């Protein structure tokens, strides 16, 4: 980490346009993968399923405008569009977006675009950002959440790797993210601090889920105005 957002962002962008693209495309895909990758695939799918369950439970997905910020290959964008939502999906990685577009049955929805989080403008009923801020130090994560909140009319769904003594220890002994060359640096964030950022922006956590498998862990919040 450089303490400089644009430099950190370049490192993340390069990673998700090279090794990170190959690794995560496989994890998010359906083909044969290693045991570790399969474990992460299962964990990530659980996070996606929590979000889909929340949105479906509230009904009215048809016509809802949704921004999927840092959409990867569209693991969440596709089911949302299939359920009738109008989805804008962007990612900092041109490779991720090209892959998502190549998988898309409808060139209009989701509307995929290469764009980093700060480049997103407009207003959406719901803004979602899954497993992205794990790649950024706290101050940068705070800036990202602030920007995402400004795009949202009523709801912000965001996931992050929670910081607590247990995960800090596991991270230190290298239990998570095995093989340092395979992963970017991961940053854990304290739940209290994330809640405070949201509260200061006028958002209250309405629903929350925690997913943990052996090699994947993610806390997801649904925050509403
Ligand atoms: N949200 C997707 C999902 O859950 O399936 C992808 C998660 S993947 C672990 C992280 C994604 O965030 C990558 O596709 C990466 O390119 C993207 N990303 C990282 N930093 C970003 C930024 N500053 N702006 C937009 N996308 C970013």
Image (cartoon, rainbow, N blue to C red):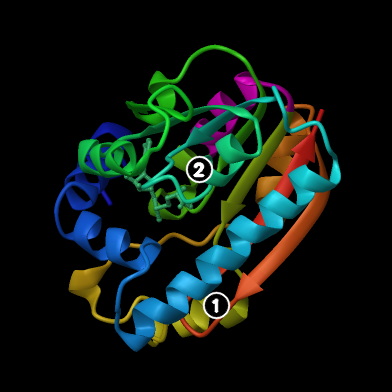
Q: Nearer the viewer, residue 208 or 38?
A: 38
**Residue 176 position (above or below residue 9):** below
* Residue 41 place in picture, x, y as percent: 45, 71
* Residue 153 place in picture, x, y as percent: 72, 19
Element type at marker 2? helix
Q: Which residue is mark 1?
A: 167
The residue shown at (24%, 80%) is 179
Q: Is residue 192 left or right of residue 86?
A: right
Q: Which residues are magenta?
A: 142-154
Element type at marker 1? helix
**Label 1 vs label 2, nearer the camera:** 2
Which quadrant of the figure shows ligand 1?
A: top left
Q: Is residue 40 left or right of residue 211?
A: left
Q: Nearer the viewer, residue 139 or 106?
A: 106
Tell me, yes or no, if residue 190 can be seen here: no
Q: Which residue is mark 2?
A: 78
* Residue 164 place in picture, x, y as percent: 62, 72
Q: Residue furthest front?
A: 105
* In magenta stretch: residue 153: yes
**Mark found first going from the N terminus, 1 or 2:** 2
The residue shown at (54%, 25%) is 147
Question: Would you say the residues marked 1 and 2 are in contact, meaning their CB atoms lie under 8 Å apart?
Answer: no
Q: Main secondary structure of the magenta part?
A: helix
* Residue 2 place in picture, x, y as percent: 25, 46
The residue shown at (78%, 33%) is 203
The residue shown at (47%, 48%) is 133
């Amino acid at each position: 980490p450089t303490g400089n957002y644009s430099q950190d962002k370049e490192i993340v962008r390069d990673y998700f346009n090279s090794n990170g693209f190959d690794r995560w495309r496989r994890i998010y895909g359906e083909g044969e993968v290693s045991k570790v990758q399969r474990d992460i695939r299962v964990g990530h799918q659980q996070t996606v399923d929590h979000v889909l369950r929340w949105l479906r439970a509230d009904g009215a997905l048809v016509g809802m405008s949704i921004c999927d910020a840092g959409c990867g290959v569209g693991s969440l964008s596709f089911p949302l569009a299939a359920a009738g939502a109008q989805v804008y999906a962007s990612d900092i990685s041109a490779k991720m977006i090209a892959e998502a577009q190549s998988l898309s049955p409808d060139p209009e929805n989701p509307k995929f675009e290469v764009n980093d989080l700060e480049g997103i403008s407009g207003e959406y009923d719901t803004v979602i950002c899954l497993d992205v801020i794990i790649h950024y130090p706290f101050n940068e994560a705070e800036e990202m959440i602030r920007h995402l909140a400004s795009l949202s009319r009523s709801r912000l769904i965001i996931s992050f790797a929670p910081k607590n003594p247990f995960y800090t220890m596991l991270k230190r002994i290298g239990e998570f993210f095995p093989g340092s060359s395979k992963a970017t640096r991961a940053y854990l964030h304290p739940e209290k601090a994330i809640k405070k950022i949201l509260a200061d922006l006028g958002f209250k956590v309405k629903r929350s889920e925690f997913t943990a498998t052996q090699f994947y862990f993610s806390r997801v919040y649904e925050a509403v105005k």
